[in-house]
Image (spheres, rainbow, N blue to C red):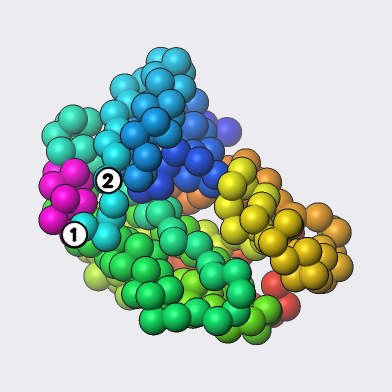
Amino acid sequence: MDLGLQGGKVIVTGGTRGIGRRIAELLAEEGCDIALCARADSRVAAAVASLRKRGVRAVGSALNVRDGDRYGQWLSEACEALGGVDIFVANVSAGGGMDGKDSERDWYRNFEIDVLAAVRGCERLADAMKDSGRAAIVIVGEVLSGEAFGPPLAYNALKSTLSTYAKQLSHALAPSGIRVNAVAPGPALSGGGRWDVLEHADPGLYGAALRQHPLRRLSTADEIARYAVFLASPAASWVNGTQIPVDGGFSQRIGF
């Protein structure tokens, strides 16, 4: 199936590793030009070099999305470098605390990185996306934001904010031709992500997730990224305002 992504212009936050990196790679393989950001210069340089080998334009900058002014400036620079924007993937995340005793610092960190970075990106890019003709926003959420799994964490609670925001935003931007959806990964081994750390830092919780999972394994970054790319594509033109679990059946909710 042709996803209709050839020539697309994409901005991805947190695009140097894990699910975000794989989303960027798959979009590049579909013929999209990519702008990405992350905190580490070396990772940004490596990701950009890898994407360029796929024959597309790729640019990147090292920055902390908690710096709203710098982040906003970079979004404008990315639009200019790509010559516009068709797709925005709000992926960057602070991740979850590991001891179940989140401090106020954890709550502020997850709010500023997971929530505000998505909101600021959507608000800054919406005007530029109106003329796209195939505009799509994909927000990377978390299936456990709707589950009472594990200890209370700022990460899970604040990811649920993005579910509501995505739905509201989809209604607000639909008249401008911009679709908004969220993909909700289940526990995933994504190369340095939350569950990669938990495998060694909290083997009890990691083992509980494996036992609960009907497939008795965690997903890969690739399995999550493929669905995110589909949601971003014109092939999903009639999918709007949804948060779709991509968890191999891990969650316990029945959606009807």
- Image quadrant holding the C terminus, namely bottom right
User: Residue at position x 13%, y 47% from top?
Assistant: 73
Q: Is 56 placed above or below 226 here?
A: above
* The quadrant where residue 169 appears: bottom left
Determine crowd level at label 2: few under 14, some 14-19, many 20+ residues with C-alpha closer than 10 A. some
Determine crowd level at label 1: few under 14, some 14-19, many 20+ residues with C-alpha closer than 10 A. some
* Picture coordinates of residue 65, whole percent (x, y): 28, 55
- The kind of residue on which mark 1 rests is Gly
* Picture coordinates of residue 193, whole percent (x, y): 58, 52
Q: What label sits on residue 32 in the rendered view? A: none
What stretch of residues is rendered in magenta? Answer: 68-76
Q: Is 86 placed above or below 164 here?
A: above
User: Residue at position x 50%, y 62% from top?
Assistant: 95
Viewer-proximal residue among 179 and 28: 28
* Picture coordinates of residue 183, whole percent (x, y): 52, 59
Q: Which residue is mark 1?
A: 68
Query: Which secondary structure is most common in the magenta stretch?
Result: helix
Q: CA distance from mark 2 to mark 1?
A: 10 Å
* Picture coordinates of residue 221, whole percent (x, y): 61, 45
Viewer-proximal residue among 234 and 51: 51
User: Residue at position x 50%, y 41% from top?
Assistant: 17
- SS label for mark 1: helix
Q: What label sits on residue 63 in the rendered view? A: 2
How many discs appear? Answer: 2
* The quadrant where residue 198 appears: bottom right
User: Residue at position x 38%, y 75% from top?
Assistant: 105
Q: Is 97 placed above or below 91 here?
A: below
Q: Is 54 placed above or below 171 here?
A: above
